[in-house]
Image (spheres, grey):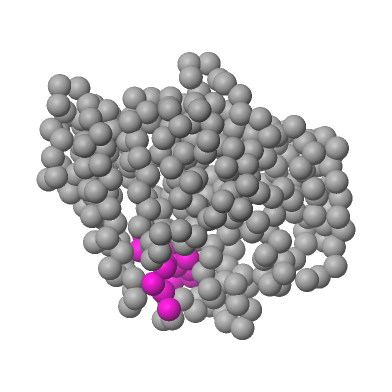
Amino acid sequence: MNAFQYLRAVSVEDAVAKAAQADSRYLAGGTNLVDLMKYGVESSSALIDITDLPLNRIESLPHGGLRIGASVKNSDLADHPQVVKEFPMLSQALLNGASPQLRNMATTGGNLLQRTRCSYFYDAAFPCNKRAPGTGCSALKGWNRQHAVLGQSDSCIAVHPSDMAVAMRALDAVVNVTGPKGNRQIPIADFHRLPGDHPEIDTNLAPGELILSVDVFPSASARHSTYLKVRDRQSYAFALVSVAAGIDTRDGKVSEARIALGGVAAKPWRRQEAEHALIGKPLSHNAYRSAAEILLEGAKGYEYNSFKIELAKRSVVRALETLEGQG
């Protein structure tokens, strides 16, 4: 690990001011950043500890929404009574992530910012455009079982590892940030980036910007929702495919639907055309399958991960049938 300064921020303004120096990083739970620094994948001239800042609260918003502080622990958020009741897909997504020990340390903001778990990204012996731009993507012709089938490019086929972010995408969350140019809000749909020609840039945060909180808003489909994670083992494993899904019905027909996929792209994957295809349709396997086909349009597999395309379609159907069974 390279030498770096350790700085403790005493206020949000102080944190942003300290981050003005080049190559600085904000440190909260550190469950991903510290590992990356140990492996030599990330380096920083300064770590700015933000754990003393008042960003660890969950506050009510008008009309039943919630403002989730960036430093709220994953375990606390998963168990929050209003999250469990009004946003079950979010609670379930968090409980399906990592291990209890990590959930007790990992934060809301850090979860959104975690980097891919691609083995080539973590191993400096292999070329990786995300780690070292311009060197190539080893996963293209390597062991790519965990990799993307949607939104990828010839520069990178890694996936975003977060479970929480998939639920946040389905909920149309809004990320509140501050930085050298002041405060702004970023819709979760615009927060993460697809790789394109610059896979080294994971998000649309500007230099020095700090996540303050994430807002989620109630809806009938958010209340009647679920999170399905398909993985190689039951716990402490990243998703091959995951689905955050919610539906609301009137007179036996779908009136509102939300579907987001994880484990298939560099950002949570959502295509509202798939949701619109369900509106007005009776609850049925065929309707769910049609929506899944639209959601996976354009998917492209590689030598070891082509199975994920059909797996994703079946997972969407299973998640929606689970909700149908819950009434």
Q: Position of residue 21 (x, y in %)?
A: 83, 53
Is residue 228 or residue 158 the one in the foreground?
Answer: 228
Q: Position of residue 91 (x, y in %)?
A: 47, 39
Q: Quadrant of residue 176?
A: top right
Is residue 245 or residue 274 the one in the foreground?
Answer: 245
Quarter of the figure that contains the N terminus: bottom right
Above or below, 195 against 276 in this view is: below
Residue 288 lies in magenta, yes or no?
no
Above or below, 243 against 82 in this view is: below
Q: Residue furthest top?
A: 62
**Residue 272 visible in the snapshot:** yes
Residue 173 left/right relative to 47: left
**Residue 276 visible in the snapshot:** no
Is residue 296 or residue 154 the one in the foreground?
Answer: 296
Above or below, 125 against 122 in this view is: below
Quarter of the figure that contains the C terminus: top left
Q: Which residue is pictured at 27% across the width and 28% down the height? A: 248
Above or below, 190 against 47 in this view is: above
Residue 143 left/right relative to 179: left
Residue 155 lies in magenta, yes or no?
yes
Q: Position of residue 63 (x, y in %)?
A: 48, 16
Q: Which residue is pictured at 55% across the width and 20% down the height? A: 61
Q: Characterize the magenta stretch by its predominant secondary structure.
A: loop
Q: Which residue is pictured at 47% across the width and 62% down the height? A: 237
Magenta stretch bounds: 143-159
Q: Residue furthest bottom?
A: 125
Q: Position of residue 294 (x, y in %)?
A: 23, 49
